[in-house]
Image (cartoon, helix red, strand yellow):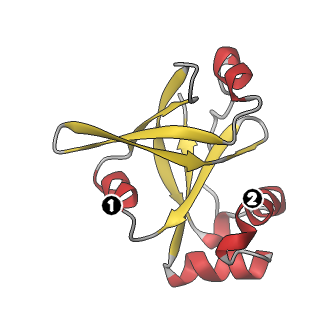
Amino acid sequence: MARPYSGGVLPAPFSDALRGSDELIVTSREDGRERSVRAWYVVAPPGTIYLFNYAFALRVARWRNDPWVRLTVPGSGVSVEGKVRFTSPDELDAAVTELIVDRWGMWGATTAPGLRRMLRDGSHVLVRVEVP
């Protein structure tokens, strides 16, 4: 069962800067230092950002230790801070599933059942960025 999330509406300057951008710079913390990587994303209504990644990536290990992230639109300097929350396959609704499958189909998530299997088997993670 999905945990209620009352946030999800991104600040207007951030939403405006996202237009035309396929990537975000995702910053997370490790041992008091910030590390940044570029990442693809999807925005699900009403303005919730999801990130999909290999479960054993270094950024995922950082997220497991400290869920804080900063999302920056490349070239704009516009950013928001939030926390990642790992999403289980049981929490996926049809709209989010369709967005993920469309965006990351080449990673093997070519169907809704394929995406759920990847999450259930632990080869990949889907996180929702909760912006206060």
How many numbered circles are shown? Answer: 2
| Mark seen at residue 26 | none
Name the residue carrying label 2.
103
Residue occupying the point 47% across, 47% down: 84
Q: 29 or 5, which lies in front?
A: 29
Local secondary structure at mark 1: helix
The answer to whether residue 4 is seen in the rendering is no
In the picture as drawn, the residue positioned furthest to the front comes out as: 75
- Is 12 located above or below residue 109 in the figure? above
Residue 9 position in % (x across, y down): 69, 28
Residue 29's quadrant in the figure?
A: top left
As shown in the figure, which amino acid type bears the numbered disc 1? Answer: Ala
Judge the density around disc 2: few (<14), some (14-19), many (≥20) Cα neighbours within 10 Å.
Answer: some
Local secondary structure at mark 2: helix
- Is 94 located above or below residue 21 in the figure? below
Residue 21 position in % (x across, y down): 70, 35
Residue occupying the point 76% across, 63% down: 97
Q: Nearer the viewer, mark 1 or mark 2?
A: 2
In the picture as drawn, the residue positioned furthest to the left comes out as: 31
Judge the density around disc 1: few (<14), some (14-19), many (≥20) Cα neighbours within 10 Å.
Answer: few
As shown in the figure, which amino acid type bears the numbered disc 2? Answer: Arg
Residue 36 position in % (x across, y down): 38, 41
- Is 5 located above or below residue 51 in the figure? above
Q: Is residue 70 left or right of residue 20?
A: left
Q: Which quarter of the image is occupied by the N terminus? A: bottom right
Mark 1 and mark 2: Cα distance apart in space: 23 Å
Residue occupying the point 65% across, 72% down: 107
Residue 11 position in % (x across, y down): 65, 19
- Which sits earlier in the primary sequence, circle 1 or circle 2? 1
The answer to whether residue 5 is seen in the rendering is yes
